[in-house]
Amino acid sequence: MPTNFLTREGFQKLQDELEYLHSVKRLEIANRLHEAMDGGELIENAEYEAAKNEQAFVEGRIQELKIILASARVIENSGKEKADNVQIGSTVTIQEAGSNPEKYILVGAAEANPREGRISNESPIGRAILNHRAGDEVQVEAPGGVYKVRILKIG
């Protein structure tokens, strides 16, 4: 089972989601299924089908979260100690030539969310900048081609 790197915040967020799915969402779906079955004919009952589909999705997500959390390695990055090189949990400012600087937090794949500035250590940029220092220029091998970025700041 591969290791899932998570920040303390990311680990807690996934635990909270798992608890919500277990305690709240399962009960909601069970109630929807019960109400749909009270309607009688299940063969063409759209509400029953929708609830069954949602139940399958929720159960799949519960299993996924259990696997992620069971194989999680929590990365402690208190922010008090400034790392010399980029690690999971580091906040990094990078710049591609001719572009504005961009600030990211490097996280494990399970908590990556590029829209929130959280990039995975498994992404092309994440792999390229990992273990490099501020001032380094690194080559990013992306599906759209190869380009270079400079690490401006860590932390």
Image (cartoon, rainbow, N blue to C red):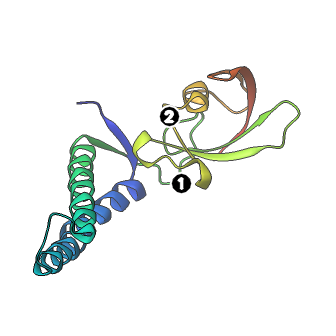
Q: Which residue is mark 1?
A: 80
Q: Secondary structure at mark 1?
A: loop
**Residue located farthest toward the right when viewing the structure as drawn:** 98
51 relative to 34, above or below: above
As drawn, is 144 to the left or to the right of 82? right
**Residue 111 or residue 35, whichever sits in front:** 35
Name the residue at 59% across, 55% down: 116
> What amino acid is found at the position of numbered circle 2 in the picture?
Asn
Residue 131 vertical position relative to residue 12 in the rendered view, above or below:
above
Q: Is residue 87 left or right of residue 147?
A: left
The secondary element bearing badge 2 is classed as: loop
Q: Amino acid at mark 1?
A: Lys
Q: Earlier in the sequence, mark 2 or mark 1?
A: 1
* Numbered circles on residues, count: 2
Q: Which residue is mark 2?
A: 121
Quarter of the image where one finds residue 1:
top left
From where the camera sits, is residue 117 visible?
no
Q: CA distance from mark 2 to mark 1?
A: 22 Å
The residue drawn where x is 61% and y is 52% is: 115
- Image coordinates of residue 147 in percent, x first then y, are 74, 22
Circles 2 and 1 in contact, beta carbons < 8 Å? no
Residue 73, given in percent of the width and then of the height, sits at 31, 42
- Which sits in the foreground, 141 or 25? 25
